[in-house]
Image (tube, helix red, strand yellow):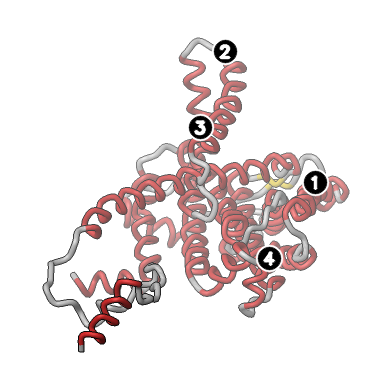
Protein backbone atom coordinates (compact mmCIF):
# COMPACT_ATOMS: atom_id res chain seq x y z
CA UNK A 1 0.00 0.00 0.00
CA UNK A 2 2.86 2.35 0.83
CA UNK A 3 4.53 1.56 -2.49
CA UNK A 4 1.30 2.33 -4.32
CA UNK A 5 0.99 5.69 -2.58
CA UNK A 6 4.60 6.49 -3.40
CA UNK A 7 4.05 5.62 -7.05
CA UNK A 8 0.83 7.66 -7.16
CA UNK A 9 2.57 10.71 -5.71
CA UNK A 10 5.73 10.45 -7.79
CA UNK A 11 4.62 9.28 -11.24
CA UNK A 12 2.78 12.15 -12.89
CA UNK A 13 2.38 10.51 -16.29
CA UNK A 14 1.38 7.18 -14.76
CA UNK A 15 -1.27 8.87 -12.63
CA UNK A 16 -2.72 10.66 -15.64
CA UNK A 17 -2.69 7.49 -17.76
CA UNK A 18 -4.49 5.58 -15.02
CA UNK A 19 -7.14 8.28 -14.78
CA UNK A 20 -7.43 8.20 -18.58
CA UNK A 21 -8.08 4.45 -18.52
CA UNK A 22 -10.75 4.91 -15.86
CA UNK A 23 -12.32 7.68 -17.91
CA UNK A 24 -12.26 5.51 -21.03
CA UNK A 25 -14.07 2.73 -19.18
CA UNK A 26 -16.73 5.21 -18.05
CA UNK A 27 -17.09 6.49 -21.62
CA UNK A 28 -17.61 2.96 -22.96
CA UNK A 29 -20.31 2.24 -20.39
CA UNK A 30 -22.14 5.54 -21.00
CA UNK A 31 -22.00 5.41 -24.80
CA UNK A 32 -23.10 1.79 -25.00
CA UNK A 33 -26.13 2.50 -22.81
CA UNK A 34 -27.21 5.65 -24.69
CA UNK A 35 -29.29 6.20 -27.78
CA UNK A 36 -27.95 7.55 -31.07
CA UNK A 37 -29.29 11.03 -30.34
CA UNK A 38 -27.68 11.04 -26.91
CA UNK A 39 -24.42 9.83 -28.41
CA UNK A 40 -24.38 12.82 -30.75
CA UNK A 41 -24.99 15.09 -27.78
CA UNK A 42 -22.10 13.49 -25.94
CA UNK A 43 -19.92 13.99 -29.02
CA UNK A 44 -20.86 17.69 -28.97
CA UNK A 45 -19.91 17.84 -25.30
CA UNK A 46 -16.56 16.24 -26.16
CA UNK A 47 -15.49 18.74 -28.83
CA UNK A 48 -16.65 21.67 -26.68
CA UNK A 49 -14.64 20.19 -23.81
CA UNK A 50 -11.53 19.93 -25.99
CA UNK A 51 -11.76 23.58 -27.03
CA UNK A 52 -12.55 24.72 -23.49
CA UNK A 53 -9.61 22.71 -22.15
CA UNK A 54 -7.22 24.49 -24.48
CA UNK A 55 -8.74 27.85 -23.60
CA UNK A 56 -8.52 27.26 -19.85
CA UNK A 57 -4.80 26.52 -20.23
CA UNK A 58 -4.31 29.79 -22.13
CA UNK A 59 -6.47 31.99 -19.90
CA UNK A 60 -6.27 30.26 -16.55
CA UNK A 61 -2.59 29.28 -16.51
CA UNK A 62 -0.98 31.94 -18.70
CA UNK A 63 -3.38 34.85 -18.18
CA UNK A 64 -4.11 35.55 -21.87
CA UNK A 65 -7.70 36.37 -22.77
CA UNK A 66 -8.69 34.99 -26.17
CA UNK A 67 -11.94 35.72 -27.99
CA UNK A 68 -10.88 34.01 -31.19
CA UNK A 69 -10.99 30.32 -30.40
CA UNK A 70 -14.10 29.92 -32.53
CA UNK A 71 -12.00 31.03 -35.51
CA UNK A 72 -9.29 28.49 -34.65
CA UNK A 73 -11.95 25.80 -34.51
CA UNK A 74 -13.13 26.94 -37.94
CA UNK A 75 -9.63 26.39 -39.36
CA UNK A 76 -9.59 22.84 -38.04
CA UNK A 77 -13.11 22.17 -39.30
CA UNK A 78 -12.47 23.48 -42.81
CA UNK A 79 -9.23 21.49 -43.03
CA UNK A 80 -11.19 18.37 -42.14
CA UNK A 81 -13.92 19.20 -44.66
CA UNK A 82 -11.39 19.69 -47.46
CA UNK A 83 -9.83 16.31 -46.74
CA UNK A 84 -13.16 14.48 -46.30
CA UNK A 85 -15.11 15.83 -49.25
CA UNK A 86 -15.58 12.39 -50.79
CA UNK A 87 -16.27 8.96 -49.31
CA UNK A 88 -13.65 7.47 -51.63
CA UNK A 89 -10.94 9.92 -50.55
CA UNK A 90 -9.12 7.15 -48.73
CA UNK A 91 -7.49 9.35 -46.09
CA UNK A 92 -7.62 7.70 -42.66
CA UNK A 93 -9.60 9.70 -40.16
CA UNK A 94 -6.76 9.92 -37.57
CA UNK A 95 -4.50 11.44 -40.22
CA UNK A 96 -7.23 13.94 -41.07
CA UNK A 97 -7.45 15.00 -37.43
CA UNK A 98 -3.67 15.32 -37.20
CA UNK A 99 -3.61 17.43 -40.36
CA UNK A 100 -6.28 19.74 -38.93
CA UNK A 101 -4.25 20.08 -35.72
CA UNK A 102 -1.07 20.84 -37.69
CA UNK A 103 -2.69 23.54 -39.82
CA UNK A 104 -4.30 25.19 -36.79
CA UNK A 105 -1.01 24.95 -34.90
CA UNK A 106 0.78 26.86 -37.68
CA UNK A 107 -1.87 29.56 -37.58
CA UNK A 108 -1.49 29.65 -33.80
CA UNK A 109 2.26 30.24 -34.17
CA UNK A 110 1.67 33.21 -36.46
CA UNK A 111 -1.11 34.73 -34.36
CA UNK A 112 0.65 34.00 -31.08
CA UNK A 113 3.90 35.60 -32.26
CA UNK A 114 2.01 38.69 -33.43
CA UNK A 115 0.05 38.99 -30.19
CA UNK A 116 2.91 38.12 -27.80
CA UNK A 117 3.43 41.77 -26.84
CA UNK A 118 -0.25 42.49 -26.29
CA UNK A 119 -1.87 42.34 -22.87
CA UNK A 120 -5.36 42.36 -21.43
CA UNK A 121 -7.99 44.08 -23.57
CA UNK A 122 -5.55 44.61 -26.46
CA UNK A 123 -5.01 40.88 -26.83
CA UNK A 124 -8.75 40.28 -26.50
CA UNK A 125 -9.36 42.83 -29.25
CA UNK A 126 -6.81 41.22 -31.56
CA UNK A 127 -8.32 37.76 -31.13
CA UNK A 128 -11.79 39.23 -31.54
CA UNK A 129 -10.72 40.59 -34.92
CA UNK A 130 -9.55 37.08 -35.80
CA UNK A 131 -12.94 35.65 -34.83
CA UNK A 132 -14.70 38.17 -37.08
CA UNK A 133 -12.32 37.84 -40.05
CA UNK A 134 -11.96 34.06 -40.41
CA UNK A 135 -15.65 33.29 -41.20
CA UNK A 136 -15.51 36.05 -43.82
CA UNK A 137 -12.72 34.22 -45.64
CA UNK A 138 -15.14 31.39 -46.43
CA UNK A 139 -17.54 33.93 -47.92
CA UNK A 140 -14.80 35.48 -50.04
CA UNK A 141 -13.54 32.18 -51.46
CA UNK A 142 -16.94 30.78 -52.34
CA UNK A 143 -15.81 28.23 -54.90
CA UNK A 144 -13.16 26.65 -52.68
CA UNK A 145 -14.87 26.93 -49.27
CA UNK A 146 -18.55 26.77 -50.21
CA UNK A 147 -19.64 30.27 -49.21
CA UNK A 148 -22.65 30.52 -46.91
CA UNK A 149 -23.59 26.89 -47.48
CA UNK A 150 -20.22 25.64 -46.34
CA UNK A 151 -18.58 22.34 -47.11
CA UNK A 152 -20.19 18.98 -46.55
CA UNK A 153 -18.13 16.48 -44.55
CA UNK A 154 -18.37 12.87 -45.74
CA UNK A 155 -17.56 10.44 -42.95
CA UNK A 156 -15.57 7.48 -44.28
CA UNK A 157 -16.66 3.93 -43.71
CA UNK A 158 -15.90 2.42 -40.34
CA UNK A 159 -12.83 0.14 -40.62
CA UNK A 160 -13.56 -3.56 -40.29
CA UNK A 161 -11.13 -4.03 -37.40
CA UNK A 162 -12.92 -1.28 -35.45
CA UNK A 163 -16.24 -3.03 -35.96
CA UNK A 164 -14.77 -6.34 -34.84
CA UNK A 165 -13.11 -4.79 -31.80
CA UNK A 166 -16.28 -2.97 -30.77
CA UNK A 167 -18.35 -6.14 -31.05
CA UNK A 168 -15.74 -8.11 -29.11
CA UNK A 169 -15.65 -5.57 -26.25
CA UNK A 170 -19.31 -4.57 -26.05
CA UNK A 171 -21.18 -7.38 -27.78
CA UNK A 172 -23.11 -4.86 -29.89
CA UNK A 173 -22.84 -3.57 -33.44
CA UNK A 174 -21.18 -0.18 -33.73
CA UNK A 175 -23.41 2.49 -35.26
CA UNK A 176 -22.07 5.56 -37.02
CA UNK A 177 -23.25 7.97 -34.35
CA UNK A 178 -21.61 5.88 -31.63
CA UNK A 179 -18.46 5.67 -33.74
CA UNK A 180 -18.33 9.47 -33.96
CA UNK A 181 -18.88 9.74 -30.21
CA UNK A 182 -16.02 7.32 -29.55
CA UNK A 183 -13.74 9.33 -31.82
CA UNK A 184 -14.62 12.59 -30.07
CA UNK A 185 -14.12 11.21 -26.58
CA UNK A 186 -10.87 9.44 -27.45
CA UNK A 187 -9.60 12.74 -28.82
CA UNK A 188 -10.69 14.48 -25.62
CA UNK A 189 -8.94 11.94 -23.38
CA UNK A 190 -5.67 12.15 -25.33
CA UNK A 191 -5.84 15.95 -25.36
CA UNK A 192 -6.53 16.19 -21.64
CA UNK A 193 -3.66 13.82 -20.78
CA UNK A 194 -1.24 15.98 -22.80
CA UNK A 195 -2.58 19.23 -21.36
CA UNK A 196 -2.46 17.87 -17.81
CA UNK A 197 1.17 16.80 -18.17
CA UNK A 198 2.15 20.16 -19.64
CA UNK A 199 0.29 22.05 -16.92
CA UNK A 200 1.90 20.10 -14.06
CA UNK A 201 5.39 20.12 -15.54
CA UNK A 202 8.08 22.69 -16.11
CA UNK A 203 6.19 24.34 -18.96
CA UNK A 204 3.13 24.85 -16.77
CA UNK A 205 5.24 26.39 -14.03
CA UNK A 206 6.60 28.89 -16.53
CA UNK A 207 3.10 29.77 -17.66
CA UNK A 208 2.01 30.37 -14.07
CA UNK A 209 5.08 32.46 -13.34
CA UNK A 210 4.36 34.73 -16.30
CA UNK A 211 0.71 34.99 -15.25
CA UNK A 212 1.46 35.83 -11.63
CA UNK A 213 4.32 38.32 -12.01
CA UNK A 214 5.95 39.13 -15.32
CA UNK A 215 8.82 41.10 -13.77
CA UNK A 216 9.72 38.31 -11.36
CA UNK A 217 9.44 35.73 -14.15
CA UNK A 218 11.77 37.73 -16.38
CA UNK A 219 14.26 38.15 -13.54
CA UNK A 220 14.15 34.37 -13.07
CA UNK A 221 15.29 33.89 -16.66
CA UNK A 222 11.92 33.08 -18.27
CA UNK A 223 11.41 34.53 -21.73
CA UNK A 224 7.99 36.11 -21.62
CA UNK A 225 7.38 36.08 -25.36
CA UNK A 226 8.32 32.44 -25.74
CA UNK A 227 6.09 31.44 -22.82
CA UNK A 228 3.10 33.34 -24.25
CA UNK A 229 3.59 31.95 -27.75
CA UNK A 230 3.92 28.37 -26.48
CA UNK A 231 0.72 28.69 -24.45
CA UNK A 232 -1.15 30.11 -27.44
CA UNK A 233 0.17 27.39 -29.76
CA UNK A 234 -0.89 24.60 -27.40
CA UNK A 235 -4.32 26.16 -27.02
CA UNK A 236 -4.64 26.58 -30.80
CA UNK A 237 -3.78 22.91 -31.36
CA UNK A 238 -6.55 21.90 -28.95
CA UNK A 239 -8.95 24.20 -30.81
CA UNK A 240 -7.96 22.59 -34.11
CA UNK A 241 -8.73 19.12 -32.73
CA UNK A 242 -12.07 20.40 -31.45
CA UNK A 243 -12.89 21.88 -34.85
CA UNK A 244 -12.09 18.59 -36.57
CA UNK A 245 -14.37 16.69 -34.20
CA UNK A 246 -17.08 19.30 -34.66
CA UNK A 247 -16.93 18.90 -38.44
CA UNK A 248 -17.12 15.11 -38.16
CA UNK A 249 -20.03 15.30 -35.71
CA UNK A 250 -22.10 17.93 -37.53
CA UNK A 251 -21.01 16.70 -41.01
CA UNK A 252 -20.72 20.33 -42.11
CA UNK A 253 -18.25 23.21 -41.99
CA UNK A 254 -20.07 26.51 -42.53
CA UNK A 255 -19.38 30.13 -41.44
CA UNK A 256 -22.61 30.25 -39.42
CA UNK A 257 -21.23 27.68 -36.99
CA UNK A 258 -18.11 29.67 -36.09
CA UNK A 259 -19.35 33.13 -35.23
CA UNK A 260 -18.22 35.24 -32.28
CA UNK A 261 -20.98 33.55 -30.28
CA UNK A 262 -18.99 30.30 -30.26
CA UNK A 263 -15.90 32.04 -28.86
CA UNK A 264 -17.92 33.73 -26.13
CA UNK A 265 -19.63 30.43 -25.35
CA UNK A 266 -16.27 28.73 -24.83
CA UNK A 267 -15.15 31.55 -22.54
CA UNK A 268 -18.30 31.25 -20.44
CA UNK A 269 -17.75 27.49 -20.16
CA UNK A 270 -14.26 28.12 -18.80
CA UNK A 271 -15.51 30.73 -16.32
CA UNK A 272 -18.35 28.50 -15.13
CA UNK A 273 -16.13 25.49 -14.53
CA UNK A 274 -13.16 27.38 -13.13
CA UNK A 275 -10.13 28.98 -14.78
CA UNK A 276 -7.12 26.72 -15.08
CA UNK A 277 -9.03 23.50 -14.37
CA UNK A 278 -9.50 20.82 -17.03
CA UNK A 279 -12.26 19.27 -14.93
CA UNK A 280 -13.96 22.65 -14.84
CA UNK A 281 -13.67 22.95 -18.62
CA UNK A 282 -15.40 19.59 -19.05
CA UNK A 283 -18.09 20.58 -16.56
CA UNK A 284 -18.68 23.85 -18.40
CA UNK A 285 -18.97 21.96 -21.69
CA UNK A 286 -21.55 19.66 -20.10
CA UNK A 287 -23.61 22.67 -18.99
CA UNK A 288 -23.42 24.16 -22.47
CA UNK A 289 -24.57 20.91 -24.04
CA UNK A 290 -27.35 19.70 -21.77
CA UNK A 291 -28.69 22.75 -19.92
CA UNK A 292 -30.57 24.26 -22.93
CA UNK A 293 -32.38 21.00 -23.67
CA UNK A 294 -33.26 20.42 -20.01
CA UNK A 295 -34.70 23.94 -19.69
CA UNK A 296 -36.60 23.59 -22.97
CA UNK A 297 -38.15 20.29 -21.86
CA UNK A 298 -39.14 21.80 -18.51
CA UNK A 299 -40.71 24.76 -20.28
CA UNK A 300 -42.76 22.49 -22.57
CA UNK A 301 -43.88 20.42 -19.59
CA UNK A 302 -44.92 23.63 -17.83
CA UNK A 303 -47.29 24.51 -20.68
CA UNK A 304 -45.14 26.85 -22.76
CA UNK A 305 -45.02 26.62 -26.51
CA UNK A 306 -41.97 25.26 -28.27
CA UNK A 307 -40.79 28.76 -29.22
CA UNK A 308 -41.27 30.12 -25.72
CA UNK A 309 -39.50 27.16 -24.17
CA UNK A 310 -36.59 27.58 -26.59
CA UNK A 311 -36.34 31.28 -25.71
CA UNK A 312 -36.32 30.41 -22.01
CA UNK A 313 -33.05 28.46 -22.14
CA UNK A 314 -30.74 31.47 -22.83
CA UNK A 315 -32.37 33.31 -19.93
CA UNK A 316 -31.79 30.43 -17.52
CA UNK A 317 -28.22 30.01 -18.76
CA UNK A 318 -27.56 33.70 -18.16
CA UNK A 319 -29.02 33.48 -14.66
CA UNK A 320 -26.83 30.47 -13.91
CA UNK A 321 -23.82 32.40 -15.16
CA UNK A 322 -24.59 35.40 -12.94
CA UNK A 323 -25.25 33.15 -9.93
CA UNK A 324 -21.92 31.34 -10.37
CA UNK A 325 -20.02 34.62 -10.68
CA UNK A 326 -21.64 36.01 -7.52
CA UNK A 327 -21.64 32.89 -5.36
CA UNK A 328 -18.61 31.03 -6.73
CA UNK A 329 -16.13 33.53 -8.20
CA UNK A 330 -13.51 30.81 -8.64
CA UNK A 331 -15.90 28.68 -10.72
CA UNK A 332 -17.65 25.51 -9.70
CA UNK A 333 -14.52 23.37 -9.46
CA UNK A 334 -12.42 26.11 -7.89
CA UNK A 335 -15.02 26.80 -5.22
CA UNK A 336 -15.38 23.09 -4.45
CA UNK A 337 -11.60 22.74 -4.05
CA UNK A 338 -11.47 25.76 -1.75
CA UNK A 339 -14.27 24.33 0.40
CA UNK A 340 -12.48 20.97 0.68
CA UNK A 341 -9.23 22.69 1.60
CA UNK A 342 -10.93 24.68 4.34
CA UNK A 343 -12.53 21.52 5.66
CA UNK A 344 -9.17 19.79 5.85
CA UNK A 345 -7.64 22.76 7.63
CA UNK A 346 -10.44 22.71 10.19
CA UNK A 347 -9.80 19.04 10.84
CA UNK A 348 -6.04 19.38 11.20
CA UNK A 349 -6.12 22.76 12.95
CA UNK A 350 -7.08 21.66 16.50
CA UNK A 351 -4.62 18.77 16.40
CA UNK A 352 -1.75 21.08 15.50
CA UNK A 353 -2.69 23.56 18.23
CA UNK A 354 -2.44 21.00 21.05
CA UNK A 355 0.53 21.65 23.37
CA UNK A 356 3.28 19.08 23.37
CA UNK A 357 4.40 17.08 26.44
CA UNK A 358 5.71 19.23 29.26
CA UNK A 359 9.38 19.08 30.07
CA UNK A 360 11.20 20.37 33.13
CA UNK A 361 14.45 20.75 31.28
CA UNK A 362 14.56 23.26 28.49
CA UNK A 363 15.85 22.06 25.15
CA UNK A 364 19.17 23.09 23.73
CA UNK A 365 17.52 25.80 21.67
CA UNK A 366 15.14 27.03 24.35
CA UNK A 367 17.07 30.24 24.84
CA UNK A 368 17.11 31.06 21.16
CA UNK A 369 14.26 33.39 20.22
CA UNK A 370 11.96 32.29 17.44
CA UNK A 371 11.42 34.24 14.22
CA UNK A 372 8.32 35.91 15.60
CA UNK A 373 9.78 36.68 19.03
CA UNK A 374 10.14 40.37 19.96
CA UNK A 375 13.65 41.76 20.01
CA UNK A 376 15.45 41.39 23.29
CA UNK A 377 15.57 44.56 25.37
CA UNK A 378 18.98 45.16 26.92
CA UNK A 379 18.81 45.45 30.69
CA UNK A 380 20.32 48.44 32.45
CA UNK A 381 21.23 48.61 36.10
CA UNK A 382 18.47 50.18 38.14
CA UNK A 383 18.87 52.53 41.02
CA UNK A 384 18.10 49.79 43.54
CA UNK A 385 20.76 47.56 42.09
CA UNK A 386 23.29 50.36 42.17
CA UNK A 387 22.44 51.16 45.76
CA UNK A 388 22.69 47.52 46.84
CA UNK A 389 26.03 47.13 45.17
CA UNK A 390 27.30 50.30 46.73
CA UNK A 391 26.14 49.27 50.18
CA UNK A 392 27.75 45.86 49.83
CA UNK A 393 30.95 47.46 48.87
CA UNK A 394 30.77 49.81 51.86
CA UNK A 395 30.05 47.00 54.27
CA UNK A 396 33.02 45.11 53.05
Do callouts 1 and 2 mark residues in contact (Cβ within 8 Å)?
A: no
Q: Give the label on residue 291, or none.
A: 3
Q: Residue at x 18, y 70 (%)?
A: 1
- The relative height of residue 89 versus residue 307 in the rendered view (above or below) is below
On the image, the x and y values in percent for residue 2 come to: 20, 72
Q: Residue at x 39, y 48 (%)?
A: 173
Query: Dot 3 lies on which element?
Result: helix
Q: Is residue 23 left or right of residue 306?
A: left
Q: Disc 4 marks which residue?
A: 105
In the orientation shown, which residue stands out farthest toward the top?
A: 303
Residue 13 seen in the figure: no
Query: Dot 2 lies on which element?
Result: loop
Q: Disc 1 marks which residue?
A: 132
Give neighbour class at mark 3: few <14, some 14-19, many 20+ (Cα, 10 Å).
some
Residue 63 seen in the figure: yes
Q: Earlier in the sequence, mark 4 or mark 2?
A: 4
Q: Earlier in the sequence, mark 3 or mark 4?
A: 4
Distance from disc 2 to disc 3, alpha carbons, whole Å, reads 18 Å
Q: Disc 2 marks which residue?
A: 305
- The relative height of residue 227 versus residue 122 in the rendered view (above or below) is below
Query: Dot 1 lies on which element?
Result: helix
Q: Nearer the viewer, mark 1 or mark 2?
A: 1
Query: Dot 4 lies on which element?
Result: helix
Q: Residue at x 35, y 49 (%)?
A: 342
Q: Is residue 13 left or right of residue 50?
A: left
Q: Nearer the viewer, residue 195 or 37?
A: 195
Q: Earlier in the sequence, mark 1 or mark 3?
A: 1
Distance from disc 3 to disc 4, alpha carbons, whole Å, reads 32 Å
Amino acid sequence: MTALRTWWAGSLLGRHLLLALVGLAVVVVVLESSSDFRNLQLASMAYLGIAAGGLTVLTGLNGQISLGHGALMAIGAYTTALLLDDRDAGTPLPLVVLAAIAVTLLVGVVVGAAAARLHGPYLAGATLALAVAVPGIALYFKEELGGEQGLRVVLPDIPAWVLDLAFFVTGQDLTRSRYVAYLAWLTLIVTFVLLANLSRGRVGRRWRAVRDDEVAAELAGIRLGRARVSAFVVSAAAAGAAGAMMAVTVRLAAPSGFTITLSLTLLTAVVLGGLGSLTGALLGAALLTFLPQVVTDLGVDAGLSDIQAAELSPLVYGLVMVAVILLAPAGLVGTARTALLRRRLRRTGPASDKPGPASDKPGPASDVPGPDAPPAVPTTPTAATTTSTTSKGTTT
